[in-house]
């Protein structure tokens, strides 16, 4: 008998030991069935049916999931934060008194007017919790360190969550969309001609969009949904004679990346129809069922910090551009709308961005626009031909030339978590024309405490599980958000 079983049975009666061994036999029989052997067998000699076979289980487990965190890898991190918030003072202007320095003989000149702003950003804690049962820890011995694996997976989940927060977390909140313009649509639909319909639109931040979870983040809860505004723009329109669809348009909202559309037959309760990433939608049918719009604006997420998109879009000036559903157009080996945004940065804050963050769709759209209307001076193609004559085809959009600042290429990053319809031109470092800025980068993660893990004590009420948590305490400091331009409302 196994020594462990012998020890385990000390002090037991013979009848209890027999019962215990019978239970162990049943367990082993069940294990045999799992591995292709139906209990005890009698065979002619030895065959695979005898059950004397090895289990070809490769070590370790194959962790087939993406940890896509290009922005968090690119942004500078500091780890000296203390207290409840990071604070700094910024001199944002010395030219409000004008630039005409001509003076009379003997005069002292006009006094330079200095604009100073007090800045602060509260630290937020981001965290994830994982766990492993004690049975999984025991059964995983010689295969994998289950607790370490659970900790690693929890940390990686947290890092992707941090990536999304850096991109477009929102603690400030965004405004609800304004008035909606309705017009008869040339598209066919299931609406009834010459009939009145109601509609409304709310704005959604990145954390409330379908783009990052694919589960239909909006419209399925009875309560108000987080990361979404209310829809105070409810209105109605009547379809024209022979018209069975309505085109709805509205202005893009700074800080939003998507919009939820609601509709109903006139005077009926509004119901969720669809989520779109551009400020336009063709209403072709009325849903039979769906959630009503939020009763209050829930986009101010107190557990998040403001990401790059939100800080830049709310900075004012030339930092937010609304294309209102219009498509990007080709210039001479460039894109007109991007060149316009670059000119705004050149004429306003007088900087040149180093990074263009776009969705995969916009990356292809920009590439096609550049190739469709380029010139020999702006394009170069390298063809690789193999020994058998095979030609590698395809192009990739990796950088954009700033026509206003020489030798300042703009890297292009196609981001899987940025929805179609939005792009960002990001200035990461200030040029030499800011001689005493006293910052190394315009965006920086200030960490009060860098990533750490906690193995929690076992709680009786939670069962025999080992909880492990991963956490980071930090905030994204936007020293110069006016150096970033958000281009929103980009049509297909």
Image (spheres, helix red, strand yellow):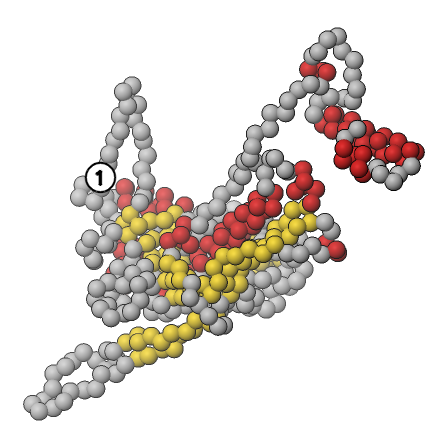
Horizontal relation, residue 9 to residue 80: left or right? right
The 10 Å Cα crowd at callout 1, few under 14, some 14 to 19, many 20 or more, is: few
Q: Could you tell me which secondary element the residue under label 1 belongs to?
A: loop
User: Who's the residue at 85% across and 30% down the image?
Assistant: 22
Residue located 76% across and 11% down the image? 43
Pick the front one: 202 or 132 = 132
Asked if 327 appears above or below 396 in the picture, the reply is below
x and y percent of residue 226 in the render?
Answer: 58, 62
Answer left or right for 270 relative to 360. Answer: right
Closest to the observer: 285 or 138?
Answer: 138
Quadrant housing residue 45: top right
Residue depicted at 49% across the width and 52% down the height: 159
Q: Position of residue 278 (x, y in %)?
A: 45, 55
Q: In the image, 282: left or right of 34?
A: left
Disc 1: which residue? 380
- Furthest toward the top, the residue is 44
Question: Where does the image place residue 321, in percent across and percent down from the top left?
Answer: 36, 62
**Left or right: 270 as drawn, with respect to 321:** right
């Amino acid at each position: 008998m196994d020594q462990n079983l012998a020890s385990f049975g000390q002090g037991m009666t013979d009848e209890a030991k027999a019962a215990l061994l019978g239970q162990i036999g049943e367990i082993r029989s069940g294990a045999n069935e799992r591995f292709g052997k139906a209990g005890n067998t009698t065979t002619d000699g030895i065959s695979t049916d005898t059950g004397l076979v090895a289990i070809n289980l490769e070590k370790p487990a194959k962790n087939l999931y993406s940890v896509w965190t290009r922005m968090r890898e690119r942004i500078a991190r500091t780890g000296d934060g203390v207290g409840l918030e990071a604070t700094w003072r910024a001199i944002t202007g010395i030219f409000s008194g004008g630039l005409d320095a001509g003076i009379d003989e003997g005069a002292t000149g006009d006094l330079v007017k200095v604009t100073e702003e007090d800045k602060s950003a509260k630290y937020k804690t981001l965290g994830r919790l994982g766990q492993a049962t004690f049975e999984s820890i025991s059964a995983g011995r010689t295969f994998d360190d289950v607790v370490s694996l659970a900790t690693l997976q929890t940390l990686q989940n947290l890092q992707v969550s941090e990536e999304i927060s850096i991109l477009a977390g929102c603690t400030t909140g965004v405004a609800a969309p304004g008035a909606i313009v309705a017009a008869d649509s040339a598209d066919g639909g299931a609406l009834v001609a010459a009939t009145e319909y109601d509609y409304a639109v709310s704005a959604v931040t990145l954390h409330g969009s379908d783009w990052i979870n694919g589960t239909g983040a909006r419209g399925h809860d009875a309560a108000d949904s987080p990361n979404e505004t209310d829809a105070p723009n409810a209105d109605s329109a009547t379809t024209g004679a022979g018209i069975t669809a309505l085109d709805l348009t509205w202005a893009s909202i700074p800080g939003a990346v998507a919009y939820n559309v609601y509709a109903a037959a006139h005077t009926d309760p509004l119901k969720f129809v669809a989520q779109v990433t551009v400020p336009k939608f063709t209403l072709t049918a009325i849903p039979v069922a769906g959630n009503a719009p939020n009763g209050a604006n829930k986009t101010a997420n107190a557990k998040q910090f403001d990401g790059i998109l939100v800080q830049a879009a709310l900075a004012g000036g030339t930092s937010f551009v609304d294309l209102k559903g219009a498509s990007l157009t080709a210039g001479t080996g460039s894109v007109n709308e991007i060149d316009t945004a670059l000119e705004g940065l050149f004429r306003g804050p007088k900087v040149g961005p180093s990074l263009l963050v776009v969705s995969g769709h916009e990356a292809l759209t920009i590439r096609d626009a550049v190739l469709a209307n380029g010139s020999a001076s702006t394009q170069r193609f390298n063809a690789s031909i193999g020994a058998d004559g095979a030609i590698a085809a395809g192009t990739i959009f990796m950088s954009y030339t700033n026509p206003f600042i020489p030798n300042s290429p703009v890297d292009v990053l196609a981001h899987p978590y940025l929805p179609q319809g939005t792009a960002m031109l990001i200035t990461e470092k200030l040029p030499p024309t800011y001689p005493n800025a006293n910052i190394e980068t315009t965006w920086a993660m200030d960490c009060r405490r860098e990533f750490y893990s906690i193995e929690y004590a076992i709680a009786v009420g939670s069962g025999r599980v080992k909880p492990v948590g991963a956490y980071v305490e930090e905030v994204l400091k936007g020293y110069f958000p006016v150096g970033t331009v958000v281009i929103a409302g980009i049509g297909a």
